[in-house]
Image (cartoon, rainbow, N blue to C red):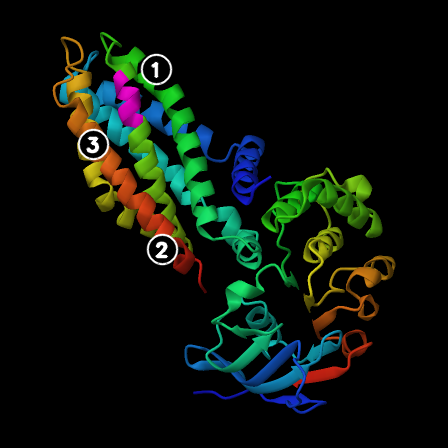
Amino acid sequence: MSPFSALLRKDLRVELRTLRSLPAMALFAVSAFVIFRFGLDREQLDGELAAGVLVPTLLFAALLAINRLFVAEREEGGFDLIRLAPIDRPVLFAAKASALVIYLVVLELIAVPIFALFFLDSASGLLPFALILLLANIGLAATGTVISTIATMSSARDLLAPLILLPLLIPLVIAAAGAGEHLLAAGGPDYGRFGTWLALLGLYDLVFLLVGYATFDYLLED
Amino acid sequence: MMERTAAVESRPASGSSQPAIELRRLRRDFGERTALGGISARLEPGESLAVLGPNGSGKSTLLRILAGLLRPSGGEISVLGCALPKEAHRLRGRVGYLGHAPLLYRDLSPRENLGLAAALHRLDPAASDSRIEMLLDAVGMSARGDDRVAELSAGMKQRIDICRAVLHEPDLLLLDEPDAHLDSEARVLVEPLVGPGNGRTRVVVSHDRESATAGAEVVLELR
């Protein structure tokens, strides 16, 4: 088994065994939908309001997993284990970001149908929106992994990760919510600027994957 | 700045052959505090170095520097021919490091932890499986090999961590209190893996002079 597969499998196995992140993320998202339902006093959402509720809710739910991403490495010596092994450190970045993408996909498989049940008149825009969410997941995972590593080295880690991460995620939120506004429109999905949002998300993903790959070696230094 | 560490060694830092470890005026500061100040020592391949000293004298810091886990603040360090910290990447995989806290994931079993360590060291899967079983058997932990590490006692964790440290058959063993938490029976079990008789170059940190200096060619005393 390659070091990447071994690290990814370790994270998924620990999550399946302890259920520390996924249930909290799903519960947070569903609770937020309930609050929005009563807070907005609306039984149906579409367009920019639907995207404005769904995308930030998924983003804030993701923060729960991002904050916990390196807890085991920090508390159980995982960083030393990796630094002693003859592997490139970006392998850890790739494994952690992949684990985060998987968590986000599982979260969305639970939360998006519940959102549709609560708020959407038609689910026809959800399939193309899934592609937007997948690209957003990759960008969120890449950025979240880098920032979580930086925050892990600080004593104010719980505060630091959201404070640094949220401003960096603004382009990603703009693109995902912008695409959602048209795909979740009242009259059915509008594909007018679909390609533009896909390209923007793809560029964001590329930039932060490269940043993670290039900097991760230095982030793990003492 | 507070200068509080001095080293006494049983052999001067000189010689012509390639040493396993060579320290010249090694220094490590943490802010204003000096944890290690001006340490020099030399260890030949196959020899053992005992590092002694009271709490806070810098023993564990020295071990982490030798493992390439911590950057020195000054001085020259060569470990297995690698000049640290510049060539720390060449040292990876050649050191067996046993810290004062086990490098084990609590929610994995000993077999899963050792399997992960084997994959990180790119060991052949078939060969590593049989070596893991051999090591678990050697330390008397075969029957508990599938339990979660969190459910094991401190001594059992130490035995598993010793297996992890020697799994990839390193050239150099860096051992921080290897006898910690072990009863007399367990000490006998781990002796062939990390004791002085296994032919590997060793650095052993301990409070216990008698156990650390057993079989040690060089003694370094930190104050």
Q: Mark 3 sits on what residue?
A: A199
Q: Secondary structure at mark 3?
A: helix
Give the residue type that dot 3 points to. Answer: Ala
**Which of these two is toward me, A145 or A212?**
A212
Viewer can see residue B188: yes
Badge 2: chain ID? A
Give the residue type that dot 2 points to. Answer: Thr
- For the point 43% across and 36% down, which residue is it? A98
First to last magenta residue range: A128-133
Q: Mark 2 sits on what residue?
A: A215
Residue A27: in magenta span:
no
Give the residue type that dot 1 points to. Answer: Pro
Viewer can see residue B222: no
- For the point 53% across and 53% down, which residue is it? A87
Main SS of the magenta part reads: helix
Which percent across, then down, holds residue A25? 40, 31
**Which of these two is toward me, B207 or B24?**
B24
Tell me if B68 is positioned left or right of A219 in this view.
Answer: right
Q: CA distance from mark 3 to mark 1?
A: 26 Å
**In this picture, is A21 found above or below B61?**
above
Q: CA distance from mark 1 to mark 2?
A: 37 Å
Q: Mark 1 sits on what residue?
A: A113
Q: Quadrant of the C terminus of chain B?
A: bottom right
* Callouts 3 and 1 on one subunit: yes
- 10 Å neighbourhood of mark 1: few (<14), some, or many (≥20)? some
- For the point 79% across and 69% down, which residue is it? B199
Badge 1: chain ID? A
Q: CA distance from mark 2 to mark 3?
A: 24 Å
Residue A129: in magenta span:
yes
